[in-house]
Amino acid sequence: MNSSSIFRDGLLAGQVALVTGGGSGIGFGIAEQLAGLGAHVVLASRSVERVEAAAERIVAVGGKASGVSVDVRDADRVREVVTDIAGSHGRLDILVNNAAGNFYVPSEQMSANAWRSVIEIDLNGTFFCSQAVMPVMRQQGGGRIINISMTLHYRGWPMMAHATAAKAGIDALTRTLAVEWASSRIRVNAIAPGPIPTEGVRKAFAAPLGGVDASGLAEAMTEHAERTIPLGRWGTPADIGQMVVYLASPGGDWITGSILVVDGGEWLSRPTVASMP
Ligand code: HXC
Ligand code: NAP
């Protein structure tokens, strides 16, 4: 398995990874890479059907994987899942906080619940999962936490106040936990992906809302990406998965508190959404 990886076979053998939102898109790409190098990967999201089907795809090509249902907004359930993993596998080496929710909505029309939903999934979920794995990782002598952020908050990004605020919070959390937990040999880093055309992104663009027709945004973004990504292509889940492996590997042993942009140079050359046709 994983003959195309630049990493050596079996690099992560014997290790256990938890990937939230691992049943789709980027999370699945990350899970594939980790499993391809020998880790047992637990895929976790709200839909047990989705994560179990995704785990089966990994197992079908020779990897080790399982699925578990969790809503990362529920701190008690998150702790239960982590306790179960530690109990059944004896360890938990890698946490990838990838689960997120997102949709375009003008800020003045965003309901309190819409704001809360995205903040709770992205920011609270990242904190709850990190907090839950910490004692397990400390007790076993260390671990790696990798948060999936974004770059849209590096500049203003209209109609995404909730997600940009949440991801800015995740960046802050990454740096703070990196310092706070370094003495427990827990490394905490983040990856900021550029645009990767997953189902989740299509869904985030889909809804015409509150009198603002957002249905043309997907096409505008596609055209924008092809025109402006300096390295000339969209990203892929594998692009992110390989960076996760690097950060999780001994090669990343002296890296903590870093936020690594993996975006083909996109954000540096990006106009704001407001300036798109
Ligand atoms: C306005 C919306 C909305 C929309 C939901 N809401 N979708 N408001 N526009 N398109 C509002 C609802 O009306 C409700 O508020 C509140 O949000 C909660 O909605 P629910 O559907 O009840 O919530 P929940 O089941 O918690 O769903 C979570 C979700 C959903 C975030 C709302 O979209 C989801 O499950 N998303 C997962 C997939 C996803 O979004 N992936 C995107 C990742 S891509 P009221 O007031 O009515 O109760 C990404 C990067 C993009 O993050 C980068 C682009 C380049
Ligand atoms: P995606 O396929 O929609 O992934 C989101 C995942 O999160 C889904 O598997 C979903 O599964 C899970 N999830 C949502 N709410 C959850 C909850 N409350 N509890 C547990 N799991 C939950 O989208 P994606 O594009 O791959 O995004 C993955 C990550 O990359 C996100 O953090 C996103 O912000 C980030 N990102 C993406 C892009 C991009 O262009 N694609 C760019 C920058 C950053 P369930 O529905 O089963 O719960």
Image (spheres, rainbow, N blue to C red):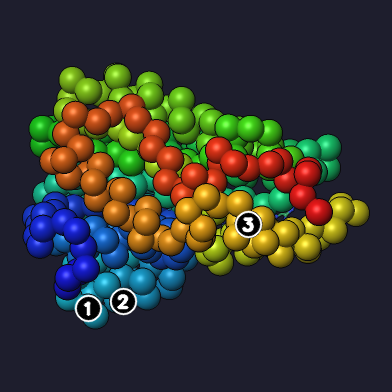
Residue found 60% across the figure and 34% down from its top = 153
Q: Which numbered mark, 1 or 3, is in the foreground of this view?
A: 3
Residue found 14% across the figure and 47% down from its top = 91
In the image, residue 267 sits, relative to residue 88, either above or below, namely above
Helix, strand or loop status at disc 2: helix
Q: Residue tagged by mark 2?
A: 57
Tell me where residue 235 appears, x and y as whole percent: 46, 58
Task: Report the amino acid beneath label 2.
Answer: Arg
Q: Residue furthest right?
A: 211
Instruction: Please state which of residues 175 and 43 is positioned toward the viewer in this rendering.
Output: 175
Helix, strand or loop status at disc 1: loop
Q: Earlier in the sequence, mark 1 or mark 3?
A: 1
Q: CA distance from mark 2 to mark 3?
A: 34 Å
Going by the image, does 220 lie left or right of 76?
Answer: right
| Residues under numbered marks 1 and 2 in contact, where contact means CB atoms less than 8 Å apart | yes
Q: Which numbered mark, 2 or 3, is in the foreground of this view?
A: 3
Q: Local crowd at mark 3 within 10 Å, few (<14), some, or many (≥20)?
A: few
Question: Residue 61: which disc?
Answer: 1
Task: Report the amino acid beneath label 3.
Answer: Arg
Q: Residue tagged by mark 3?
A: 227
Q: Local crowd at mark 1 within 10 Å, few (<14), some, or many (≥20)?
A: few
Tell me where residue 243 appears, x and y as whole percent: 31, 48
Instruction: Please state which of residues 17 and 254 is positioned toward the viewer in this rendering.
Output: 254
Decide if ligand 2 comes within 8 Å of the CB at mark 1: no
Residue found 19% across the figure and 58% down from its top = 6
